[in-house]
Image: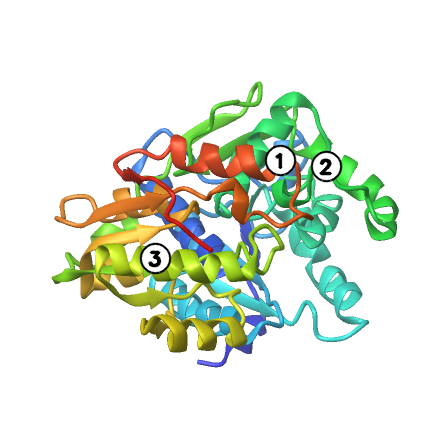
Amino acid sequence: MSPRAGNAGPRTSGTLAFVESPVQLLNVLEWAHAHAQDPRHAPAPDAGEARGGAAAGDGAASPAGLTLVVLAPNDPMTRGQLRRMAELARQEGHEVRWEEARGGPAAPLRTIGGLAGMLRRAGRVVLGDPFSRYVQLLLTITGAGELVVVDDGTATMEFAGQLARGERLVRWHRKGGRPGPRDLLLAPVSSSARRRLTPGARRAVRLFSAMPIEETPRGVDVTVNDFGWTRARFGPPRVTRGADLVGTSLVETGVVDGERYLEAVRALARAHGATRYFAHRRESAGKLHRLAVETGLEVVRPDLPLELIARRGPIGRTILSFPSTVVHTLPPALAGTEVRVAVCDIDPAWLTPGASPRARGFLSGVTGTARGVDRLASVAAG
């Protein structure tokens, strides 16, 4: 089915979800599955009912009938994974609306204008990235009485802490830097989003996460994501004797030096006998080509989030990773299997001169709070 197929005549739903990455879409499916299993949760009200007024639109809808809006990025790798995840969502009975949200200068206005009516009618909005400028703009339109934030990787940990402390919403790898012109221009939008993501008399805010939330914002209800949908739909996997290594985009985000990273991958693979390297969707083609040539690892470009790839198998008995989301998500996704997840610390010497002052402590926190993993000392790099 074409990704645009969901655009024709969308029905009004009480639950509207916005995703920009495959992992966000996966976690919306996990939320819908967990929500449906919990008898305490009622269907979402319409926005009018949530504010005590008359219902608007077609009435309430349960999570089983939620509408997923994909704000499509331009990156081909991410788009491919999103298309695969969208098909899985349709197979679960959810409606998917694909928006070319970045398809030219006029795309944002066209996208926001086309979604405005649905946003005003929705009683519940689920979102995967509260740092996204696009999502923040959309939040200024909705009057939903319930907002649900699902995981967008390790950024969820920083979001929860910033909301708890009343700070402006800034991605962890940029924190400490001077705001640019675009940041200043959109500061009112970010401030409005933060206010809307703060629970109040007319709005409930919930967090659905597999990440360790050390600072719970006051009034925010937190539910643990145990990857029940993934375990129910996939696996158990065939486990091989070898080791697999999980890639990271820390070089692409300017946190880790590229040469140091290449040396660390080579040393880690050699020490543990890894043969495959599962690339992060944001890793550059040039970096991956060099990595394959210089380390001998087979570079695999997954067509689905790694949690699903690992659960389907085959997968190595040991999965090696640097600090990243998967050190928190793979253990519950692979619960009941014999797979071991091991995380290698980032040596501070690998950080670039331009890395955020927050980077070192944040990355250490990612590994230090991971449950059900083996912690490895950082390997020699360079």
What is the crowding at mark 3: few (fewer than 14 residues within 10 Å), some, or many (at least 20)? some
The label on residue 358 is: 1
The front one of 151 and 201 is: 151
The label on residue 346 is: none
Label whose residue precedes the other's in the sequence (3 or 2): 2
Mark 2 and mark 1 residues within 8 Å of each other at the beta carbon: yes
Label whose residue precedes the other's in the sequence (2 or 1): 2
The label on residue 176 is: 2
The disc labelled 2 sits on which kind of residue? Gly
Q: Position of residue 231 (x, y in %)?
A: 23, 51
Label whose residue precedes the other's in the sequence (1 or 3): 3
> What residue sits 47% from the left and 34% below the top?
364
Observer able to see residue 56: no
The disc labelled 1 sits on which kind of residue? Arg
Residue 126, placed above or below residue 244: above
The front one of 91 and 256 is: 256
Nearest to viewer (mark 1 / mark 3): 3
Q: Position of residue 143 (x, y in %)?
A: 69, 39
Nearest to viewer (mark 3 / mark 2): 3
* Disc 3 target residue: 267
The N terminus - image quarter:
bottom left
Does 108 sit left or right of 36 as displayed? right
Instruction: Say which element carries label 2.
Output: loop
The disc labelled 3 sits on which kind of residue? Ala
Q: Quadrant of residue 48?
A: top right
> What residue sits 44% from the left and 37% below the top?
366
